[in-house]
Image: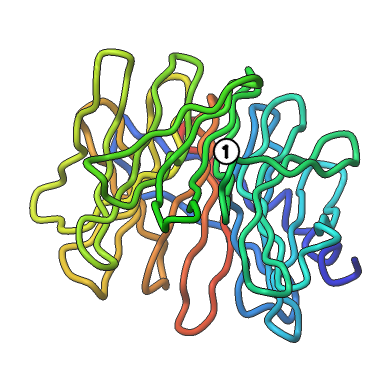
């Protein structure tokens, strides 16, 4: 708890005004848990409450929630090999996943101080990536036959989402029933689609061989990472048909993750062997 609480003073410093209409270069302020080699802020809600994970001195990942009152560590009791928090909705419900002592992934929901495991029936491993303000949850699972697919849970039923039998996951869903599907095109090469009730359309960036969509807000703005080769990733926000690069200065790689309806973004940035988190406004208040 002490390690995470030391992140608190950064909260007032990690907000920056970025004018997308003027295509200004985003201003980044960084967050690092002391002693951690990796810190990332992965999701946030419309109250600007963020969730993420960072490593301890043994390189074990711990989840944490960051709000105006401070930082709170949140670890699943069975997450002996790590806890990862991926998203939070406006009710404060958190989704994520943990690694057990066999290095198997298990998705969970955390609400009112209680963990509940979640995932499609007969899944061998599960991960939860997103949650909207209606409580719908998205994720990925692997079944006993090794089939890797995405899922959407509406509180009663699971919808399994495939993409031509390729390994796939559903990263996020918004209030307009638009969700993000990411699939593995080749080994470790991923592509993404925007899916509506009318169908799916692939996200294409000229020259990019790998496009990984992360989160989508109610306006349809999307965080993503892309690369023209396998070594250099670029962060971006997709606003309509416009791709706005958001590469953090001094970083080798930028990974935007969360975006809320205020166009506040969260993410992670690699500075050599160290990854730090960031939190910034895309629009003025």
**Helix, strand or loop status at disc 1:** loop
Count of numbered circles on the image:
1
Residue, disc 1: 120
Name the side, left or right, on which 81 lies relative to 279: right
Q: Which sits in the foreground, 131 or 185?
A: 185
| Residue at figure coordinates x 78%, y 71% from the top left | 80
Q: Position of residue 16 (x, y in %)?
A: 55, 45
Q: Which sits in the foreground, 282 or 233?
A: 233
Q: The C terminus appears in which quarter of the rendering?
A: top right
Name the side, left or right, on which 44 lies relative to 91: left
Q: Which sits in the foreground, 5 or 203?
A: 203
| Residue at figure coordinates x 67%, y 52% from the top left | 85
Look at the picture and state if 80 lies above or below 111: below
Look at the picture and state if 156 lies above or below 93: above
Look at the picture and state if 242 lies above or below 31: above
Look at the picture and state if 220 lies above or below 131: above
Circle 1 packing at 10 Å, graded few (<14), some (14-19), many (20+), is: many
């Amino acid at each position: 708890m002490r390690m995470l609480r030391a992140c608190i003073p950064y909260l007032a410093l990690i907000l920056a005004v970025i004018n997308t209409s003027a295509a200004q270069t985003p201003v980044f302020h960084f967050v690092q848990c002391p002693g951690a080699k990796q810190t990332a802020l992965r999701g946030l809600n419309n109250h600007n409450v963020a969730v993420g994970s960072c490593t301890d001195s043994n390189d074990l990942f711990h989840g944490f929630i960051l709000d105006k009152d401070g930082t709170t560590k949140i670890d699943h009791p069975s997450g002996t090999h790590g806890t990862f928090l991926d998203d939070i909705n406006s009710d404060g419900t958190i989704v994520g996943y943990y690694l057990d002592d066999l290095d198997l992934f298990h998705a969970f929901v955390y609400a009112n101080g209680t963990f509940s495991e979640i995932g499609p029936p007969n899944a061998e491993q599960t991960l939860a990536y997103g949650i909207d303000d209606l409580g719908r949850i998205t994720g990925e699972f692997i079944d006993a036959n090794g089939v890797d697919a995405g899922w959407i849970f509406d509180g009663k039923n699971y919808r399994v989402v495939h993409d031509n039998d390729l390994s796939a996951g559903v990263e996020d869903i918004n209030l307009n029933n638009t969700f993000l599907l990411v699939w593995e095109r080749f080994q470790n090469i991923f592509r993404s689609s925007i899916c509506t009730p009318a169908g799916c359309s692939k996200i294409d960036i000229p020259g990019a061989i790998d496009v990984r969509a992360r989160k989508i807000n109610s306006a349809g703005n999307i965080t993503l990472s892309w690369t023209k080769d396998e070594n250099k990733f670029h962060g971006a926000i997709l606003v309509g048909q416009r791709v706005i690069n958001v590469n953090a200065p001094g970083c080798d790689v930028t990974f935007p993750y969360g975006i809320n309806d205020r166009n506040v973004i969260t993410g992670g940035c690699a500075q050599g062997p160290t990854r730090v988190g960031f939190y910034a406004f895309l629009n003025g208040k």
